[in-house]
Amino acid sequence: MNEKNLLRILTLFNNSEEAESLINILRNAGQIIRDIRVEDEEDLHAALEENPIDIILAKKETPLYSARQAVEFLQRTDRDLPLIVITEAGQPVDAIEELQAGARDMVASDQPDRLRHIVNREVGDLKIRRAFRRNEQMLLETEKRTRDLIDQSRDAIAYIHDGMHIYANNAYLKMFGYADLEDIEGVPILDMVSIDDHPTFKDFLRKYVRGQNTEDTVEVKGKQVSGDYFNIIMEFSRASMEGESCSQIIIRDRSDSEELEKRLHSLSKQDLLTNLYNRPHFLEQINKLLGLSVEGKAHGVLMFIAIDKFDSIREAVDISGADLLLADIADLLKSQIGQNCILARYEGPVFSLLLYNIDIEQATEIAELLCKAIHEHTSDINGKLINTTASIGIMRINETISNSHECISRVEKGCSAAQKAGGDQYFVYNPAIAELAEKEKINQWAFLIKEALKQNHFHLLFQPIVNLHGEPGAHYEVLVRMLDENGKELKPAKFMPAANNAGLTKYIDRWVIANIFKLLLEREKQGLLTRFFVKVSENSLIDPEFIPWLSERIRALRLTTENLVFELDEDTALNHIKPARMLIDSLRQLHCRTALQNFGIESNTMESLKQLNVDYIKLHYNLIHNLAQSVENQEKVKTITNATSEKNILAIASFVEDANSLALLWQCRIDFIQGHFLQHPNAKLDYRFEDAF
């Protein structure tokens, strides 16, 4: 189970069904939830002491405890946990006293959309507060370690704020002739520079403050207290001192070789193929601009410029020719851009451009000019004339973005969108618009899925599950495919995520089960005994109507159910352990069998066998894929089969794709195998099980 995506909710209700209905609203929205129920202050105290909690849902009034009392308890114990007050359905939302006491919000129990919005918002805010506290502590620890390192450094290092010194190490004090730190605190940095260099130095500082410098160093004559002058190179960078933003100045100890040091410093920033800046230096510049933007001192635009169909070009001109093309395009880009920007080769055929203090409208004009210039340019590569185009991704850098990873992720998405649209164009990535587009995409899929259910535009495929050491007979995995408006077959990976987000997977489950029931009846009439493995989605697992519906269908058809095996995903079952146990027990009463699929990679995987009394387990893809090359996986499989054998649980290895894995699985005492090595899924039930081995 992915703990990072887990939402831990504490509920304070006197009615467990009411609490469960609210939890299901969040689960149906795709949340992975672990919930803890309490009824009074003693329970609340114990739960908070023993478990990490992300949010509390508390009914306004219960016979034993109230939301107001819970809020007051959180205040007394100084806990930073959002508490949402749940009021009665169909009544005016009224919890003013609780809000005044410290509750974060209130919502009626019949307002599911509002509940989902509030929970997402409050949990997001809590994560930000927790991250802020962690970062604040890390900052203090880092500053302490940095101060120790600075004091021991041979390089002269100082910190300035608003042009005044606030700290300097011993090497800096000695360089300028000061006795101790008190003598230099509050002294202007201009006092360290000769008067003749003041215009140059002031111009550098002005551009540095605005984030307009492409270099972070300035060469001037330093001035000592005694009045003597000496040549120095000051290297500036953004920093903080005791929580306040400031600038760090480093004057390197160049006693060994000043000229060599300059050369190495230059090479460390350069891409040798194109003579542009390289990726590490470019990322440093993004971080500097982000620091300025957070303080409201600057903003900018980031572009990725990717050469279209570069693989085809490389095949045409070979690797050395492709390098020549990149160098040629680099020269073209340099000729097209102005001074107030940084151009780099980011990686492969991708160039990156950082533009300072311009808006999106100006950036799109530049992107359009670059697209046009590349489109019209012809490169002569060893006698071959090569024309190419570029796709450009664009994203805005301002105070809303906290790190370079987010910048790169956004601009890559913009670049990818331009490429998918055919290339030779730009695309501005806006996360808010992208989120709306994703929601619209889900809504479109939901409509198509509903229509497919109405029009019966689904069909079943089957893949044999073959006996090695288990039970003889015909066993098939049941797989579902959706047909689009043109009759083209769509795999579950295409439509199931949208179906899950829209709460439609339970209806797909029912379509599959209803059709399998018909097939079972037909096979029984023909005297053919066939066991079918049918998947049960998370939506069906938590649907209180699923078992009554299933039971009613079985009774109405007078169906023999021993040959039905219902599969639950292990991760899903462990996340909904109580509903999973109830479902498995109910299926057993209906004389159906059960299985856990994707088994074996959870940290508490063997514990699930104690919690869930299933008949089969199906091993996870990660355990079977490349089994022949992984001794570790072979040992894991043996451990699992030994444990399942003791519990009379049959083990199935899916995704078997080669004979080498088959031999190992035989040695590991796997009961059944399934995979493309045996047969690809198809619509016919014609596998000859008796001839398999």
Image (cartoon, rainbow, N blue to C red):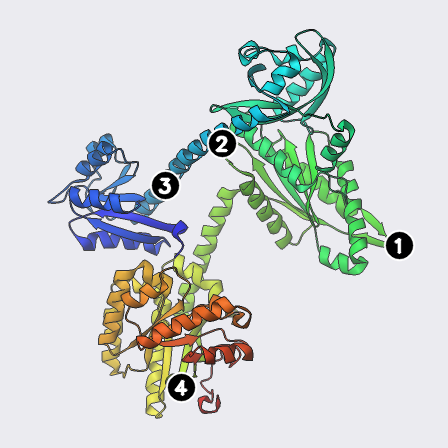
Mark 3 or mark 2: which is in front? Answer: 2
Callout 2: SS: helix
Q: CA distance from mark 1 to mark 3?
A: 60 Å
Query: Mark 2: few, some, or many residues within 10 Å (few <14, many ≥20)?
Result: few
Q: Which residue is mark 4?
A: 474
Q: Which residue is mark 1?
A: 383
Left or right of 490 in this view: 414: right
**Residue 100 bears which disc, if any?**
none
Left or right of 281 in this view: 537: left
Q: Is residue 474 visible?
A: yes
* Quarter residue 271 falls in: top right
- Counting from the top left corner in percent of width and height, residue 562 is at 29, 82
Answer yes or no: do the residues labelled 1 and 2 have beta carbons within 8 Å? no
Q: Is residue 95 visible?
A: no
Identify the residue at horizontal 55%, vertical 22% (top origin).
246
Q: CA distance from mark 3 to mark 2?
A: 31 Å
